[in-house]
């Protein structure tokens, strides 16, 4: 079907725009399927690709502002069918650093972090190695327990209260974690990027922004 947002799509452009509009309203896949009369399997397939495109967009903004950052998107590798998959499964707890760049909130999964770091943050006493691990973040979140920790700048420094923006972002993210009853390791990366996108455009209408993004970077290019 003809669809400038995704060549070779099984959905017409009109139906795809309807799906995208419902996604912009932050409805679940089940709700979107019920309203649009599109199968849940098809809806989930498109939502995954939309989230992948959002993730790559967010990564490109971060790379432009901080070229030294290693892009998490580099972990997105093609499967034989040409699909794009999230990074390999993450160990639990999933610990995320939250920071701001150019008034945008970004997140970064901290694979080296573990329970000892969370215990140190909770008690207000970090080991030097753990302090170095989180010193560039304004907040650290444990996605398993839905908890945000303030970060101290140095092993013995007092904890610094997370900024209002970080707190607000975490509120949105926590709400989505509860809404989706947690996130498995295969989807956490994409949902974090989606939370960034929604928060950073919180005062704008997401639908036209998504239309512009997908017109400039159509979904079928994900498999190029």
Image (cartoon, helix red, strand yellow):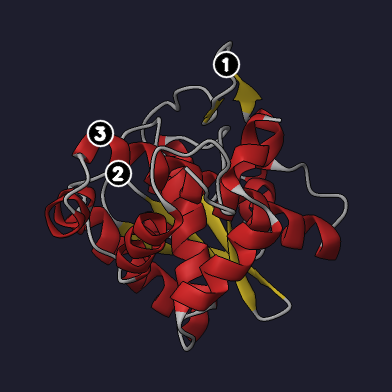
Extreme residue toward the top, this view: 80
Extreme residue toward the left, this view: 34
Extreme residue toward the right, this view: 67
Instruction: In the rendered structure, find residue 106 and report the number of the disc placed on it.
Output: none
Could you give the CA–CA distance between mark 1 and mark 3, rounded to whole angstroms? 19 Å
Residue 15, placed above or below residue 81: below
Residue 196, placed above or below residue 111: below
**Callout 2 touching callout 3 (CB < 8 Å):** yes
Q: Tell me where residue 33 appears, x and y as whole percent.
A: 18, 50
Foreground pick, 49 / 164:
49
Foreground pick, 193 / 159:
193
Instruction: In the rendered structure, find residue 79 and report the number of the disc placed on it.
Output: 1
Residue bearing mark 3: 41
Could you give the CA–CA distance between mark 1 and mark 2, rounded to whole angstroms? 20 Å
Residue bearing mark 2: 43
Name the side, left or right, on which 34 lies relative to 219: left
* Residue 150 appears in the figure: no
């Amino acid at each position: 079907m003809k669809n400038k947002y995704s060549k070779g799509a099984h959905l017409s452009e009109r139906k795809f725009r309807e799906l995208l509009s419902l996604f912009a309203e932050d409805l679940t896949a089940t709700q979107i399927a019920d309203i649009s009369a599109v199968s849940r399997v098809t809806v989930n397939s498109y939502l995954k690709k939309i989230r992948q495109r959002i993730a790559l967009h967010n990564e490109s903004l971060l790379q432009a502002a901080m070229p030294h950052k290693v892009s998490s998107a580099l972990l997105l590798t093609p499967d034989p069918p040409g699909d794009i998959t999230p990074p390999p499964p993450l160990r639990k707890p999933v610990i995320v650093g939250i920071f701001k760049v150019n008034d945008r909130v970004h997140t970064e999964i901290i694979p080296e972090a573990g329970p000892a770091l969370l215990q140190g943050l909770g008690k207000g006493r970090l080991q030097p190695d753990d302090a170095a691990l989180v010193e560039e973040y304004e907040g650290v979140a444990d996605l398993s327990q839905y908890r945000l920790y303030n970060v101290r700048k140095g092993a013995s420094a007092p904890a610094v209260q997370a900024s209002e923006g970080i707190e607000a972002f975490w509120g949105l993210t926590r709400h989505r974690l509860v809404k989706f009853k947690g996130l498995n390791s295969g989807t956490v990366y994409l949902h974090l990027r989606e939370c960034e996108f929604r928060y950073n455009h919180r005062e704008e209408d997401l639908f036209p922004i998504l239309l512009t993004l997908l017109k400039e970077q159509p979904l079928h290019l994900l498999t190029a």
